[in-house]
Image (tube, rainbow, N blue to C red):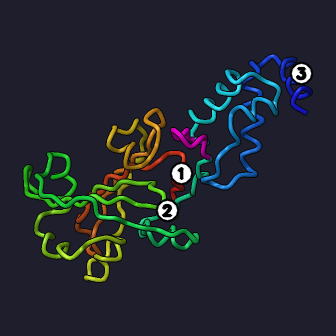
Amino acid sequence: MGAFLSMQLSRQDEPVYRELADVLRRELADYQAGDFLPAEVQLAERFGVNRHTLRRAIDELVFEGSLLRRQGKGTQVLERPLIYPMAADSAYSQLLSDQGLDVEALLLKRRYCFASREEAQHLGLAEMAPMIELQTLRKLDHQPVSLIRHRYCASHAPMLADYTGGSLRQYLSERDLPLTRTLSLIGARLPSREEAALLMMPRHLPALSVFTLSCDRDGRPVELAQTTSRSDRFQYQVVT
């Protein structure tokens, strides 16, 4: 089979490694997230190509976020993107839990800071007004997928004092402060070194960036959230 495939590939106009990448891409449907591909020497022998060609093919899938090389372990299959319906009242944890996923929200950091001019305008505060920031890491089925920086006027600090993890939306709603998303700006950028390490993602893979403003039931702005997510794990669906 390997020799036949090699002969077939060599007749294509596309470079052999790209044709091989297409074959491997199709075969990923037979793997589960977290599985490892066979060793490179085995794959090279199976397809009748040299290891340099095989590595270039795998590089294509690593670059697009389908595979991840793990030193000393091999090449691992990554999760396919999840669709996150972004509605005004959607709650990250609840929506993904409803899809049958094990959702964790871990509190990484709690600190005081000061409002920038833009933050002050969004929240109706004075520039340099004191704020409290909570940084959370979201995991799906024990795999890190999103970092979220939540910022509030420091007057909300007493209410947030007991928060140690879990859904912040639910936490606030239980304290009679339900929030509704009123503005979302979606972009993409390369992750910082720290973000890539926390999200266990390659630094060349763009991260999705979502800036969100949420208000209370009376329309008063309460929360600014900056979410950084693995682009190979998320697709945002805007629901109107």
* Residue of label 1: 233
Observer-side mark, 2 or 3, equals: 3
Q: Is residue 240 something that shows in the picture?
A: no
Residue extent of the magenta highlight: 68-76
How far apart are labels 3 and 1 at the CA level?
A: 36 Å
Decide if residue 105 is on the left or right side of residue 70: left
Observer-side mark, 1 or 2, equals: 2
Question: SS at mark 1?
Answer: loop
Q: Earlier in the sequence, mark 1 or mark 2?
A: 2
**Contact, CB < 8 Å: mark 1 with mark 2?**
yes
Residue 65 at what x, y percent from top left?
56, 40
Tag count: 3
Q: Quadrant of residue 17?
A: top right
Decide if residue 2 is on the left or right side of residue 15: right
Q: Is residue 153 something that shows in the picture?
A: yes
Q: Earlier in the sequence, mark 2 or mark 3?
A: 3
- The image shows residue 148, relative to residue 4, as above or below, that is below
- Specify the amino acid type for callout 2: Leu
- Specify the amino acid type for callout 3: Met
* Residue of label 2: 140
Q: Nearer the viewer, residue 217 or 233?
A: 233
Decide if residue 140 is on the left or right side of residue 129: right
Residue 150 at what x, y percent from top left?
27, 59
Question: SS at mark 3?
Answer: helix
**Contact, CB < 8 Å: mark 2 with mark 3?**
no
**Residue 83: which numbered mark, if any?**
none
Question: Magenta segment: does it hold 104?
Answer: no
